[in-house]
Amino acid sequence: MNTRNNLEGKKVAYCTLGCKLNFAETSTIGKQLASLGCEKVKKGEEADICIINTCSVTEAANKKDRQAIHKMQKQHPNAIMVITGCYAQLKPHEVASMDGIDFVLGMNEKFEIATLLEKMASKNEAPSIKCSEIRSIGEYHGACSADDRTRHFLKVQDGCDYFCTYCTIPFARGKSRNGTIAEICQLAQEAIDKEAKEIVLSGVNIGDFGKTTGETFFDLIKALDNQEGDVRYRISSIEPNLLTDEIIEFTAQSKHFAPHFHIPLQNGCDEMLKIMKRRYDTALFAHKIQRIKEIMPHAFIGVDVIVGARGETPEYFEQARSFIASLDISQLHVFTYSEREGTRMLEIPYKVSAQEKKRRSDVLHQLSAKKLKLFYQSHIGYNGRVLWESKKTEGMMNGFTENYLRVKAPFDSNKINCYESVIVTPENIDPLHE
């Protein structure tokens, strides 16, 4: 059967949940199907094929996955339903038990969607489950997303070998693996050639880059910095023990890397870090923040924190809150601990009540709001290089400076995806971002 004849003109609806990595991979799948004649469904049209790329970082994420699946089925009742991503990898039979599912595809199989659809003339009578044993997978699939975004997300690494006690990602994404620097630079250059002005380096544990190629993350950023083009890079979440001083110092003097860091702390109490099996202590974390601010005082630093994990006594939480308050950071990303089947955290007897989890979350959200406000106030008068985005809200447009200050201006379509030098003022700041 001719592939193009079978998929030519088919309407495809995409739904992506979760992390930037998922968005990059959905974009890559979309490009594969587009090359075979598929078209992205337009608003109001009914799709022939629905592809839902799921997340499973918390139980709440699983619930959102199920809601998204039901919504897509209601909007596109006759479509072939393909479910992939972390939820599909971790709970394939649970996903398959839902009505109307045709394919449940694991992490590695998601890149075979085009081949599977080519062989399929109509909906399956029963769900087809294709999920490889994830820890045995050594293949790496590169990806870069650009779907209606000013920002491009460039996948540089996949999987994780850390096995923190609260986390299922190693079971959903597999072992740490990556492409070569040459391959990733080629993907970056292709994005730049298509007028990408900002590229976010994404992965599960990007600082672990190079395990499968004998290279290092430092080698990668040096190579990317040598790419030609008016582009800037942001480093997405990087483990503090892998954020070396040489990476920090290189970022400070690089041509293209933004003074912006996203560093997972997860807890500000050393005893809790041991329970979580994290690979650093608060002293190392504090050193990283201090070093960044010493050489890049304007740098934006976002920090991930989990509240209410098993073992987090009131005393441990207060230690964490006090430590976080002492850090010269810009914003917190606060996550409430969620019980995950199969994790070692379930062996810890001390549990935090739902009510107390909410209270602790509220405390840290308030602390985050205070730190973000101070960060913006300290940058009044700062001359930033803003990249304007396409979204129009009440006649205004937004953009981010290199150090992630969000500013606004009257909408001007000629400025979309363009850089502009802007002085930050109380009138143009717009700090409502994650």
Image (tube, grey):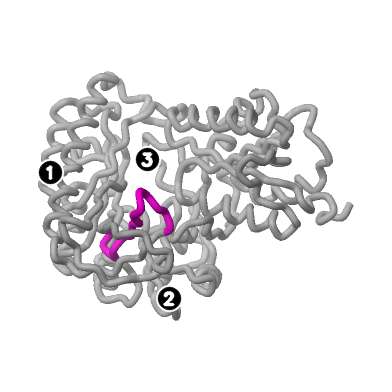
Residue 170 or 189: which is nearer the viewer?
189
The vertical placement of 204 against 133, above or below, is below
**Residue ID for mark 3:** 164
Q: Residues within 10 Å of mark 2 (few under 14, many from 20)?
A: some
Along the line of sight, which residue is nearer the eye, 161 or 231?
Answer: 231
- Number of marks in the image? 3
- Name the dominant secondary structure of the magenta segment: loop
Indicate left or right for 273 with 76 as reference. left
Looking at the rendering, the stretch of residues picked out in magenta corresponds to: 390-404
Q: Amino acid at mark 3?
A: Cys
Q: Quadrant location of residue 308?
A: top left
Magenta residue check for 395: yes
Crowd band around label 3 with a 10 angstrom C-alpha radius: few (<14), some (14–19), many (20+): many
Please, is residue 311 above or below residue 43 in the view?
A: above
- Is residue 120 something that shows in the picture? yes
Circle 3 SS class: loop
Q: Position of residue 177 (x, y in %)?
A: 51, 56
Q: What amino acid is labelled 1 in the image?
A: Ala
Residue topped by disc 2: 223
Classify residue 357 as left or right of residue 88.
left
Q: Mark 1 vs mark 3: which is more N-terminal?
A: 3
What element does badge 1 sit on?
Answer: helix
Question: Residues under labels 3 and 2: Cα distance?
Answer: 31 Å
* The label number, if any, that marks residue 114 in the structure image: none
Q: Residue at x 23, y 29 (%)?
A: 312
Judge from the rendering whether residue 222 lies leftward or rightward of residue 25; answer left or right.
Answer: left
Q: CA distance from mark 1 to mark 2?
A: 36 Å
99, 58: nearer the viewer: 99
